[in-house]
């Protein structure tokens, strides 16, 4: 099989900067392109759409990538491994550049074996590209392997004599690799029946932890701003070259760049969404930009900076997150730009292209996001989707105004980040935004009780001890006295004999079966059935030197007091569970909370 250019040039291609995950993604792209064509045709596909990546088990191991695609003919295989050739058009596919296969394989290792077969073929056919053996004749060795099942189909790429540093990274970072690929292909995994397995584990889509479609804030008590905004704007159709991919003027018959007559009218559309993440993060916020379902930019923050077109070069002013810099940001989104060209590394768009500039204008507008800055520069108000979210959610004050969970006094960012981690782990209790929402509502309720308590305080700044004792049920009596709850008038001290009734008094009636005392377990079960999780206090408590306990805090939702072991009203009841776990029941209607807003 003839391949070009020479092995020396192929080795030089391996010096092009590609991260390990980018090299593997290049080979996955080619398989997913094949899957996409099959899926769009509506043809049932035996064996499903699956790509498997076998990672090296040592520095001397090998990397194997297998797919269940259609396989290739000998002629197609010869073109596929030839540097500079691409069978893909420049607009519908993930694998955009013919150099992708050569760069990724040469960067990973010195020997690559490609084997492919189609349904009904009698054997696997392939080629071995050994960078240490290919000479000036550009010939690579043809190889074949027997095929046990004639219905088998697909392609297998085996890369050996791996570069030591890259082999070590692949050997030790299987989990990180799955996470990156889960982000890059998340939209594809959620919208198409494609599977990707790395190191024996299926790659799951990494979804955004955003507020629900129905959440919003009230800006200036008059404008309702949702926490999720859909974007779908079609631009005028364009004329694109099927060979080089360049967009043309609509009145041309041939490509002005390469001379090809393969010009087709194509749709140009900016669509997706912007939203608010349920937690703030210093790094994981920003906008994802996708092309044909693959993320080109992840957590991109460049639209949060305004560039003054009338200023000097480099005149850039960051606008978000300015007020929130110590905690990070939470504006996120996914924007599809299938018509915008990307760089050969697929890690950026061609920012000088007018299609990119048009998309930016749709998403963030032309004026500054900061209203005062826009007014000072005589811009009209920015009404873009990004400016709308910036206006409604730029601050991080706890409560309903900015949709930030709190504890009655301040935001609980550490807690919400921990809940976000549980969301990404797939914990079913954290998939909806109810836990975050309840923390916002509880913050407002606690804050309101605190205000009422301050207004009713007897002496500002000094605790009313008598009121505390009364609220706890002691009626001002000394703790431990015969009339205190610990030894009330209706109870008998251990070892004491019951006194006979005095003259004129009747003996107390014996308890009847109908008035059987409720057991503790029955009470706890009743409390569980009539309570909801209290998010801001459901957490680990403890110290590294003595250990931790896991506490689930639950708030009573029905009218009726919470009682302790002696059946006296109590604001908090702890129930020990298995291991180091506790359930803490809270009666927020207890006087101690009502009086002091604690």
Image (cartoon, rainbow, N blue to C red):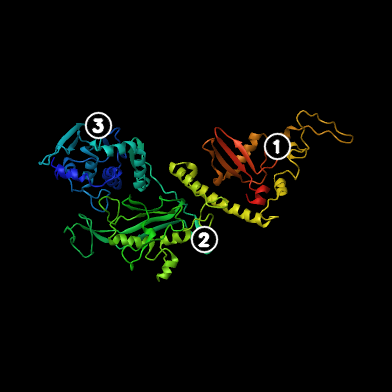
Horizontally, is 460 left or right of 180 in the view?
right
Whole-percent x, y for residue 476 in the image:
75, 45
Residue at x 65% of width, y 49% of height: 593
Q: Residue 418 versus residue 322: which sits nearer the camera?
A: 322
Residue 178 got which mark? none
Whole-percent x, y for residue 254 in the image:
17, 61
Residue at x 61% of width, y 38% of height: 574
The quadrant the N terminus occupies is: top left
Tell me the CA gap for discs 3 and 1: 75 Å
Question: Circle 3: is it few (<14), some (14-19), or many (20+) Cα within 10 Å?
Answer: few
Residue placed furthest toward the right: 503
Question: Circle 1: is it few (<14), some (14-19), or many (20+) Cα within 10 Å?
Answer: few
Secondary-structure class at tag 3: loop
**Residue assigned mark 3:** 149
Tell me the CA gap for discs 2 and 1: 47 Å
**Residue assigned mark 1:** 566
Tell me the CA gap for discs 3 and 2: 64 Å
Horizontally, is 314 left or right of 439 in the view?
left
Residue 218 got which mark? 2
């Amino acid at each position: 099989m003839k391949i070009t250019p020479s092995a020396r040039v192929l080795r030089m291609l391996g010096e092009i900067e590609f991260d390990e995950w980018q090299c593997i993604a290049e080979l996955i792209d080619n398989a997913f392109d094949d899957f996409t064509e099959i899926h769009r045709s509506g043809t049932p596909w035996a064996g499903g759409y699956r790509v498997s990546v076998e990672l090296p088990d040592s520095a001397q191991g090998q990397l194997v990538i297998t797919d269940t695609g259609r396989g290739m003919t000998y002629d197609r295989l010869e073109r596929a491994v030839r540097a500079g050739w691409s069978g893909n058009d420049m607009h519908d596919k993930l694998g955009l550049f013919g150099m992708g296969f050569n760069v990724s394989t040469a960067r990973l290792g010195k020997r690559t074996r490609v084997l492919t077969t189609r349904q009904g073929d009698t054997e696997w056919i392939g080629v071995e590209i050994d960078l240490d053996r290919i000479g000036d004749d550009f010939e690579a060795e043809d190889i074949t392997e027997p095929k046990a099942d004639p219905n088998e189909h697909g392609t297998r790429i085996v890369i050996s004599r791996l570069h030591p540093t890259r082999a070590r990274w692949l050997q030790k970072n299987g989990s990180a690799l799955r996470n990156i690929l889960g982000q890059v292909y998340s939209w594809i995994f959620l919208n198409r029946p494609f599977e990707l397995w790395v190191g024996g584990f299926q790659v799951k889509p990494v979804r955004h932890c955003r507020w629900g479609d129905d959440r919003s804030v009230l800006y200036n008590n008059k404008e309702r701003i949702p926490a999720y905004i859909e974007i779908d704007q079609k631009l005028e159709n364009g004329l694109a070259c099927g060979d080089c991919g360049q967009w043309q003027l609509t009145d041309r018959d041939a490509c002005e760049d390469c001379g090809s007559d393969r010009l087709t009218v194509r749709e140009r559309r900016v669509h997706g969404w912007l939203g608010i993440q349920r937690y703030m993060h210093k790094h994981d916020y920003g906008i994802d930009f996708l092309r044909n379902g693959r993320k080109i930019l992840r957590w991109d923050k460049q639209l949060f900076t305004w560039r003054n077109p009338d200023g000097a070069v480099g005149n850039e002013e960051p606008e978000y997150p300015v007020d929130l810099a110590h905690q990070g940001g939470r504006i996120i989104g996914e924007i599809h730009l299938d018509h915008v060209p990307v760089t050969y590394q697929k890690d950026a768009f061609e920012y000088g292209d007018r299609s990119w500039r048009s998309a930016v204008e749709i998403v963030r507008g032309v004026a500054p996001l900061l209203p005062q800055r826009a007014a000072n520069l005589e811009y009209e108000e920015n009404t873009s989707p990004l400016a709308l979210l910036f206006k409604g959610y730029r601050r991080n004050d706890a409560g309903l105004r900015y949709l930030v969970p709190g504890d009655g006094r301040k935001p609980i960012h550490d807690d919400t980040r921990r809940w976000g981690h549980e969301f990404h782990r797939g914990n079913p209790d954290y998939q909806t935004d109810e836990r975050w929402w309840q923390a916002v509502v509880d913050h407002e309720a606690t804050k309101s009780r605190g205000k009422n308590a301050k207004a009713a305080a007897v002496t500002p700044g000094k605790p009313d001890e008598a009121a505390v004792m009364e609220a706890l049920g002691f009626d001002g009596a000394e703790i431990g006295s015969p009339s205190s709850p610990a030894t009330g008038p209706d109870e008998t001290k251990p070892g004491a004999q019951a006194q006979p009734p005095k003259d004129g008094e009747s003996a107390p009636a014996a308890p009847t079966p109908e008035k059987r005392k409720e057991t503790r377990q029955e009470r706890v079960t009743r409390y569980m059935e009539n309570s909801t999780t209290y998010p801001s206090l459901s957490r680990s408590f403890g110290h590294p030197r003595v250990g931790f306990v896991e506490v689930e805090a639950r708030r009573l939702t029905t009218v009726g007091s919470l009682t302790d072991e002696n059946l006296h009203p109590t604001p908090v009841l702890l129930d020990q569970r298995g291991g180091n776990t506790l359930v803490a029941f809270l009666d927020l209607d207890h006087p101690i909370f009502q009086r002091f807003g604690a």
